Amino acid sequence: MKGVIAIYPGSFDPPTNGHLDLIERGANIFGKLVVAVLHNTEKGAPLFSVKERKEMLTALTHPWKNVVVDSFEGLLVDYARRIKARALLRGIRAISDYEYELQMALMNRKLQPNLETVFMMPAEQYSYLSSRLVREVAQLGGSIKGLVPDLVERRLREKLDPAVKLEHARDPRPRKRG
Ligand code: PNS
């Protein structure tokens, strides 16, 4: 599917290792993969702004030359038409994801029959992982090591404890890329 532009849409609040696993799988299959961050209006106030999420995703997807990061508002099918995407990539972790994903895929097919939804499974060690759980565990002081890239872990710590950011500003030693 090297000639195919695919969209990997989502909230990515924040991006997790499960998202990156799927991005890698998508990048290996499609000619171009557009990771598209939704300007959510329905899900309440996000933890990270769209700009912050795009920044993180851009840094994290740097190794894949056929991956670009963008954001969109409104209907996904309209955005897909605008950027000439022929496929949507979604991850299915467990059977519990299936119903919601099936509903979305069929609604999108109704709206735009030429746009194909492709499901992929992330590596099994990420099958329980979600941005919501990562946010919750981080907010309650639990460890999220190994669940998100180092960069995201750092950004989460800075977001939840602004004193950490101040500390880094005073001691700007180079840190490992995430
Ligand atoms: O990571 P998420 O939050 O599960 O992603 C959901 C997303 C962004 C794929 C979905 O909410 C979406 O496509 N929203 C755009 C609005 C739209 O097109 N709605 C109809 C979809 S059936």
Image (tube, rainbow, N blue to C red):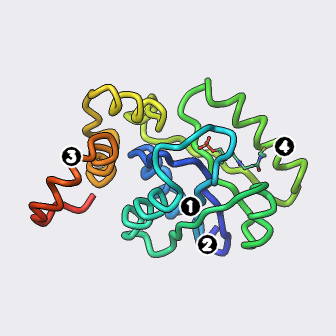
The circle drawn on residue 2 is 2
Observer-side mark, 4 or 2, equals: 4
Q: Amino acid at mark 2?
A: Lys
Residue at 44% over, 60% down = 57
Respond yes or no on whether mark 2 lies under 8 Å from ligand 1.
no
- Residue 130: image location, x then y, percent: 47, 35
- Residue 153: image location, x then y, percent: 29, 46
Observer-side mark, 2 or 3, equals: 3
Tell me the CA gap for discs 4 and 2: 26 Å
Give the structural element (helix, strand or loop) at label 1. Answer: strand
Q: Residue tagged by mark 3?
A: 163
Please tell me which residue lies in front, 70 or 146: 70
Observer-side mark, 1 or 3, equals: 3
Residue 81 higher or lower than 95, as above or below = below
Sequence-first disc among 3 and 4: 4
Sequence-first disc among 2 and 1: 2
Do the CB atoms of the residues marked 1 and 4 lie less than 8 Å apart? Answer: no
Tell me the CA gap for discs 3 and 4: 45 Å
Q: Amino acid at mark 3?
A: Ala
Q: Residue tagged by mark 4?
A: 107
The residue carrying pointer 3 sits among few (fewer than 14), some (14 to 19) or many (20 or more) residues within 10 Å by Cα, namely few
Observer-side mark, 2 or 1, equals: 1
**Residue 34, picture quadrant:** bottom right
Sequence-first disc among 1 and 4: 1
Q: Classify the position of the N terminus by image quarter.
A: bottom right
Residue at 79% over, 55% down = 75
